[in-house]
Amino acid sequence: MRLTFVCLLFSKLMTATAIVAAIFPNAIYIAADSRLTKTANTAGPADSSEGCKIVQTPVAAFAVAALTSDSKTGFDFRAIAMKALAASKGPLASRIDAVEQALAPQMKRAADAVKEDFPDIYEAFQMGHLGQAVFAGWEAGHPVLIEDDWNIAADGGIRQERFPATEEMNLIILGSGGDAILRYVSDHPDWWMSSTPEALEQLIQAAIKDAETTHTADVGGAVSVLMIDSQGQRWVSPGVCSDSGRR
């Protein structure tokens, strides 16, 4: 099946990451790089390490781009989302409602802290996205894939937008690697004809290669690919991830 973009709302101003997700009638795939970047202080360079960007929970899997944590305020997107998903009930859309409600006040405090300490990064968030995430699950015998975006409104508040994927618009791209991925898709029009895990990994690798070429090093490391179907969640290519991350 051909892969078609859900929406093109990523920005090169996004915090370093490259995430792609695709939905089909019988499966969902999420792929991501493993480069983690932290800005320690206003004068120092960004520190990088490697870690798993795809989070598994019993009810859904998700991956996050942009503002994922802030040490000053204690904001932790992953921890907040995991707790909200576990405590909520109903379909994935309802559980994401709970995630948004839990995230909103803490994300606002984190954004205000970034504005105070890193005004240039805050400006980048204003021009792009404060946060982006993709949530995937299986319900009533069908796959569900939803993109959720957080933006800084003109009044400084947090505005959310949601984009459910469909069979017709079935590919989501998040993160700073999006521009490189689009160039790769344009230069390789038959990229989607490989198996889905291989095709998605090719997209992530294109973002990694672009980061290496431009010496930005904001995307990199091993590529992880998670598959979700009626049998549950499993790693097609674990990279630095493992099922031990599921809680």
Image (spheres, grey):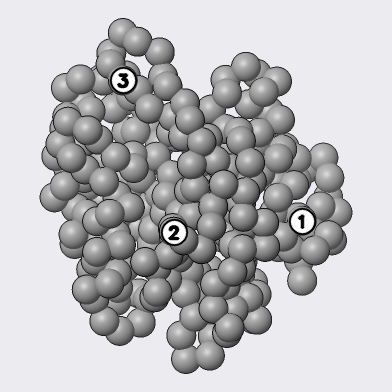
Say whether marks 1 and 2 touch (CB < 8 Å). Answer: no
Pointer 2 residue = 245
Q: Mark 2 or mark 1, which is nearer the start of the sequence?
A: 1
Residue 136 pos. (x, y %):
48, 69
Residue at horizontal 53 percent and vertical 57 percent from the top: 242
Q: Is residue 87 visible?
A: yes
Task: List the residue tagged with mark 3.
Answer: 40
The amino acid type of the residue labelled 3 equals Ala
Q: Report the quarter where the N terminus lies.
A: bottom right
Q: Could you say where residue 202 lies in the image, as x and y percent from the top left?
A: 75, 47
Q: Which residue of the protein is positioned furthest toward the top in this rendering?
A: 43
Image quadrant of residue 196? bottom right
Q: What's the mark number on residue 198?
A: 1
Residue pictured at 28% horizontal, 16% vertical = 41
Residue 159 image position (x, y, % from top left): 25, 51
Q: Measured along the vertical axis of the image, is residue 238 above or below residue 179?
A: below
Q: Residues within 10 Å of mark 2 (few under 14, many from 20)?
A: few
Residue at figure coordinates x 26%, y 46% from the top left = 76
Image point (41%, 54%), residue name: 133
Q: Residue furthest front?
A: 244
Q: Is residue 23 above or below residue 54?
A: below
- The quarter of the image holding the C terminus is bottom left
Disc 2 marks a residue whose amino acid type is Gly
